[in-house]
């Protein structure tokens, strides 16, 4: 241990023994804790703060393991060269000293609970004003229990399941000291080349808004300041999902009207559900980066949308104003970001470094700094940290066994996320006995790609792979032959030969194909959203055997399916389902559960159709009914259609829809109309069906989508049962965003469909007068 370290080994050991005592006595020893209770008292606290302390409250940085003794840290990190170890230990000391000085307001991605207890003890008992720290991390779709990736959960068309899984994540995460999570991501994603499709709810505004609100309610629970609540930080504000060409971090070339019509509604739904944190996005909008965009972060977010909470940058996005060419240097970037309405700088450190001098030089009004600090303190107050800084720093709770219900919920949510895209000749479900099954493909026995992107924390138990689950289901596990055939992105020597041999010896082939975890998520834009060539070659060789083929697709975006994969008898979209992945897939494949998931985004015919989504405007030369004729709107050689449209999904029943009926032919603008259709299940199994309601405004001052989802309902249908499913339409579902970015309701004819997907169903029409 070098002498220049701020803290000695003895002091670290002293902190280990005193941290818990400090946690207990903090409230009694800190008068600030008793005085914070409303905005007036927050203002009094701000008046006591130095500029450096104010800037510190606006700074978030990664937490280091400040609790661990140096010798223990060295033992746990034997790979570190001595110079790196020395620098790391020194950085730990510096961070704790900065906490003591009030130069840090928030810490992110903690390594251990002891570190958080130690850091909070120093913040509350040893800093001048005793303002508590706030801790956060990317708890996107799981912590100790891993639930399906968000895009998969959206396929359930059941926002309540997302609320329940987010609640479970909050219970687990808050027990480990997390006060906030950088979730949900509510970006509408209409270009499947963009890798972060996997983190959201897909292409539709209504579905995205409902899931945004549900996840906020789940993370935050009934009370934001409860010990098992985590504040939701809604991201990415705004239009990050509109990145040009689906290229991550690229600009979003959209209009102001499109921003209001498509990309802001899920944020508004999240704010209405109680979110008081949001994250500025990396992208530009009309040439202005979000983190320095005053029109976006102040005029729209606060003045129009009524947001009262705090805005944080995405990882160093306020510093990246320089790389954009929007700021001249880091100092200028700090000024522009704070002035725009970005209250918290994530990781870059430019706020504490430059804000005090910017105020002293007169380049930045201190009132703007005070405003940002006020918002941050309000967020901390709402998180319950002024009432009890250690509210989520409880070792006993952190060490307690997980509720059994979380594992059960993981399986339930995984099953509900699975989408059956195709099932020719009722190949599925497979029998549990009597047939030899060849499970072929790189994901058959895979254990590394079950959870999906943003699963960085250690789960309580390993996730269940597909082959293990299949063997548990089959009456004779020896009937299952597992062959990789290829790696995910490369062939295996002799792999295809072994796969073909296994296929020939089997009665049915199950092909487990798809994308690896590293192919989806942040910074994983793809030019071709197809399966890797090695897997395509494997599929073609196996299909040539003539055996019936079931394809299990593991992916985090819509794919352009080709050849033998597209032509397989059955295609099951299994996503990344987390802890209970294998069991959930087996539940559906072997028929214990009838699939009920629906596509939250359209599967294109070809990659080149991107961006492709169902709610597109008609051109003046629409290519109708699959036409590929000249001088019509389509790509050469293919119709202007999806392979599988938004909302599509099959069950193990036989579902049919009668024509859509309207209760009246005409309805006043202040009136309501009932739209209904009979939905029948003529099959021999009970099912769940997602009945969807779409409209089209035939003539409007702004060209309207071909169809727009305005409602949906999940209904249970017994074998042989017919239900009359009805919806009520009023002005709230018939209006649209006009050229002035305000809602408008216009008279005219409306087409309407009660349908199983965005391109199915027999429509009807009515007049709005």
Image (spheres, rainbow, N blue to C red):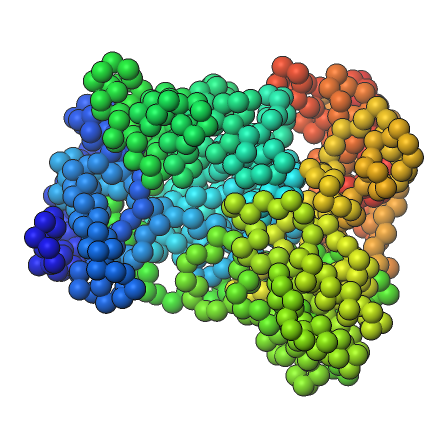
Point out residue 359 in the picture as x, y percentages from the top left corner: 24, 19
Residue ranking furthest to the front = 493
| Callout count | 0
Name the residue located 79 percent from the left edge and 61 percent from the top edge: 564
Front position in the image: 676 or 291: 291
Front position in the image: 105 or 249: 249
Depicted 277 relative to depicted 63: above or below: above
Name the residue located 82 percent from the left edge and 73 percent from the top edge: 545
Name the residue located 86 percent from the left edge and 26 percent from the top edge: 621
Q: Is residue 387 visible?
A: no
Point out residue 353 in the picture as x, y percentages from the top left corner: 25, 30
Residue 349 appears in which quarter of the rendering? Answer: top left
Residue 747 appears in which quarter of the rendering? Answer: top right
Residue 593 appears in which quarter of the rendering? Answer: bottom right
Point out residue 65 in the picture as x, y percentages from the top left corner: 25, 55
State left or right for residue 670 relative to residue 102.
right
Depicted 593 relative to depicted 616: above or below: below
Q: Quadrant of the N terminus?
A: bottom left
Depicted 393 relative to depicted 673: above or below: below
State left or right for residue 526 relative to residue 436.
left
Q: Is residue 287 visible?
A: yes
Q: Quadrant of the C terminus?
A: top right
State left or right for residue 670 relative to residue 377.
right
Name the residue located 25 percent from the left edge and 38 percent from the top edge: 104
State left or right for residue 386 relative to residue 493.
left
Point out residue 236 in the picture as x, y percentages from the top left corner: 50, 36
């Amino acid at each position: 241990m070098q002498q220049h370290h701020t803290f000695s080994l003895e002091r670290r050991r002293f902190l280990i023994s005193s941290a818990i005592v400090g946690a207990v006595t903090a409230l009694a020893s800190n008068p600030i804790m008793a005085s914070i209770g409303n905005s007036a008292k927050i203002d009094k606290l701000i008046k006591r703060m130095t500029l450096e302390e104010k800037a510190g409250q606006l700074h978030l940085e990664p937490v280091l393991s400040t609790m661990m003794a140096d010798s223990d840290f060295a033992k746990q990190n034997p790979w570190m060269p001595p110079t790196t170890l020395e620098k790391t230990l020194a950085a730990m000391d510096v961070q704790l000293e900065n906490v003591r000085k009030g130069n840090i307001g928030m810490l992110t991605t903690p390594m251990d609970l002891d570190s958080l207890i130690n850091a909070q003890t120093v913040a509350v008992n040893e800093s001048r004003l005793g303002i508590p720290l706030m801790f956060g991390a990317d708890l996107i779709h799981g912590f100790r229990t891993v639930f399906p990736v968000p895009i998969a959960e959206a396929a359930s068309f059941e926002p309540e399941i997302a609320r329940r899984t987010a609640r479970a994540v909050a219970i687990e995460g808050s027990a480990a000291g997390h006060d906030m999570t950088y979730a949900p991501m509510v970006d509408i994603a209409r270009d499947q080349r963009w890798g972060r499709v996997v983190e959201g709810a897909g292409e539709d505004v209504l579905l995205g808004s409902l899931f945004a609100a549900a996840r906020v309610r789940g993370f935050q629970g009934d009370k934001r300041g409860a010990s098992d609540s985590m504040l939701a930080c809604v991201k990415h504000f705004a239009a990050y999902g509109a990145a040009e060409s689906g290229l991550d971090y690229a600009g979003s070339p959209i209009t102001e009207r499109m921003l209001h019509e498509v990309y802001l509604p899920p944020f508004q739904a999240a704010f209405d559900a109680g979110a008081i944190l949001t994250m500025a996005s990396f992208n530009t909008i009309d040439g202005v980066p979000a983190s320095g965009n005053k029109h976006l972060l102040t005029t729209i977010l606060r003045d129009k949308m009524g947001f009262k909470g705090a805005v944080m940058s995405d990882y160093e996005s306020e510093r990246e104003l320089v790389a954009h060419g929007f700021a001249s240097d880091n100092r200028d970037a700090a000024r522009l970001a704070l002035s725009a309405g970005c209250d918290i700088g994530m990781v870059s450190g430019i706020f504490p470094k430059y804000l005090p001098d910017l105020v002293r030089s007169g380049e930045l009004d201190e009132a703007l700094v005070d405003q940002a600090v006020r918002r941050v303190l309000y967020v901390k107050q709402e998180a319950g940290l002024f009432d009890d800084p250690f509210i989520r720093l409880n070792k006993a709770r952190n060490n307690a066994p997980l509720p059994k219900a979380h594992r059960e919920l993981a399986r339930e949510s995984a099953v509900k996320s699975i989408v059956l895209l195709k099932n020719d000749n009722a190949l599925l479900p497979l029998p549990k006995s009597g047939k030899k099954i060849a499970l072929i493909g790189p994901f058959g026995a895979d254990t590394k790609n079950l959870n999906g992107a943003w699963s960085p924390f250690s789960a309580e138990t390993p996730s269940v792979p597909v082959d293990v689950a299949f063997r548990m289901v089959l009456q004779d596990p020896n009937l299952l032959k597992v062959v990789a055939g290829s790696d995910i992105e490369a062939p295996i020597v002799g792999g295809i030969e072994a796969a073909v041999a296994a296929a020939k010896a089997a009665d049915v082939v199950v092909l487990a194909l798809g994308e690896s975890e590293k192919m989806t998520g942040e910074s994983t834009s793809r030019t071709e959203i197809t399966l890797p060539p090695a897997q395509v070659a494997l599929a073609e060789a196996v299909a040539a055997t003539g055996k019936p083929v079931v394809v299990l697709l593991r992916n985090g975006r819509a794919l352009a399916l080709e050849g033998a994969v597209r032509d397989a008898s059955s295609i099951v979209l299994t996503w990344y389902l987390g802890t209970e992945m294998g069991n959930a897939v087996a539940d559906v494949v072997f028929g214990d559960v009838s699939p009920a998931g629906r596509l939250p985004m359209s599967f294109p015919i070809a990659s080149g159709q991107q961006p492709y989504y169902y709610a597109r405007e008609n051109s003046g030369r629409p290519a109708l009914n699959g036409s590929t004729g000249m001088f019509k709107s389509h790509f050469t050689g293919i119709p202007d259609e999806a392979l599988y449209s938004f909302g599509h999904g099959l069950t193990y029943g036989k579902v049919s829809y009668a024509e859509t009926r309207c209760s009246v032919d005409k309805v006043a603008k202040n009136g309501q109309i009932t739209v209904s259709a009979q939905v029948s299940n003529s099959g021999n199994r009970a099912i769940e069906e997602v009945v969807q309601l779409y409209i089209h405004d035939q003539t409007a001052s702004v060209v309207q989508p071909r169809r727009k989802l305005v409602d949906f309902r999940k209904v249970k249908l017994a074998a042989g049962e017919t239900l009359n499913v009805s919806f009520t339409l009023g002005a709230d579902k018939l209006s649209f965003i006009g050229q002035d970015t305000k809602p408008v309701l216009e008279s005219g004819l409306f087409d309407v469909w009660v349908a199983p997907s965005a391109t199915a169903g027999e429509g009807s029409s009515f007049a709005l007068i």
